[in-house]
Image (cartoon, helix red, strand yellow):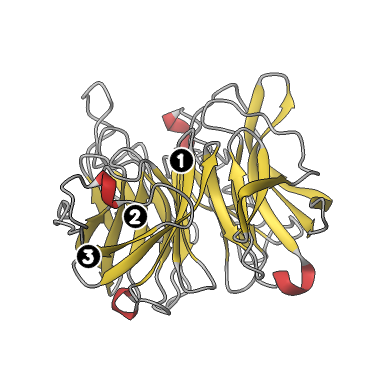
Amino acid sequence: MRKFYALASLWLLPTVTNLASSLPTSANESRLIKTDLVTVTLEKMYSGLDTPWAIALLPDNRLLVTQRDGELVLLDPNNPLEKKRITGLPEITAKGQGGLLDVVLDTDFTTNKTIYFTFSHAEAPGKVGTAIAKANLNLTSEPKLENLKILYSMSMKDNSGRHFGSRIVQAKDGTLFFTIGDRGTQPRAQDPFDPAGSVIRINTDGTIPADNPDPQGKNMLPEIWSIGHRNAQGATLNPVTHELWTISHGAKGGDEINIPQSGKNYGWPTISYGRNYSGSKIGVGQKAPGLEQPIYYWDPSIAPSGADFHKGKTIPEWTGNLFVGALKDQSLIRLTIKDNTVIEEERLFENELGRIRDVRYMHDGALWIATNDGDGSIYRILSAP
């Protein structure tokens, strides 16, 4: 497994020397950016958000945004300075890295108006864990959630504020994948009867799919799809193969991209391409029998988060490329994929937009990104005029 490092990303600058001044500074500003393959338009859509975690574009082009402190807001491109708070959420415990996290639309949203979201759920004082819920979105003048149902709330909750995972992906068969981190306790990811450190797969009503690895729960929890993941905060569906791809945080190095297969073990913390923050060795090294290898890793860590594949509608040069948001490295990473192998990496907007938390290819053909700061912003990337 080779380590890959940043290739130079190029900017088409106005007549200034400061890179930051070439970027949008308020909503509806845009700039032309030259990348390795194509010149694109970077457009700032919204700003002034409070630690946004995930975004979802509605069919009418309004935008849903989760804010980690527990607010779901609706943004309108016709009035970008207004945030409408959506009511009807369950009680959310915003603790450490937890709060209101991912949100996705059901693949049949135009008919059923259903959304899914993850959050940190407390069932007893001080004990929290990752949960996923669904609700119908009522877009009246005072938008609200109706028919709320918590589909799954992890067992073995604890008082940790770390590693909630929480990315949701709806598969082609309609089932829901979502990730749960190891909750900051490494050995939990190797326990097949502990949901921490796992990819979970359920039906949209919360039941267990009959083709899960162990739906009877004899050798692992029936909801588990795969184990051995540290903290997957990125997940998406490959548009060609329809396979789930996940992107996990490493410790000091060892961020991973995996294609989790049914019942497989992805190694954390028995194997890793990183080290503990103290510098000490993790587990037995980088490989061990019966444990899966990542298809790609970063060392040193970039702190990856949201990710999505570009389908080429507005930028055909990027068709099939995987885009990953980096928190620590404050960049958008473009990966060229061939036969499930990463063959090229390019870093965009490095240290210019801030911590990139979410990345979504939306129905308008644009790649949307959200920056995860106290004054968070939403951008979209389109072809140059």
The answer to whether 277 appears left or right of 27 in the picture is left
Location of residue 43 by image quarter: bottom left
Q: Which residue is identified by label 2?
A: 257
Residue extending farthest front? 15
Give the mark, 1 or 3, whose residue is nearer the N terminus.
3
The picture places residue 311, in percent across and down from the top left corner, at: 42, 76
Using the image, tell me which numbered label, if any, was put on residue 35. 3
Q: Which element carries disc 2, helix, strand or loop? A: strand
Q: What kind of residue is marked 3?
A: Thr
Q: Nearer the viewer, mark 1 or mark 2?
A: 1
Using the image, tell me which numbered label, if any, was put on residue 223. none
Location of residue 258 by image quarter: bottom left
Residue 294: in sight, yes or no? no
Give the mark, 3 or 2, whose residue is nearer the N terminus.
3
Give the mark, 1 or 2, whose residue is nearer the N terminus.
2
Mark 1–mark 2 distance (CA, rounded to whole Å): 21 Å
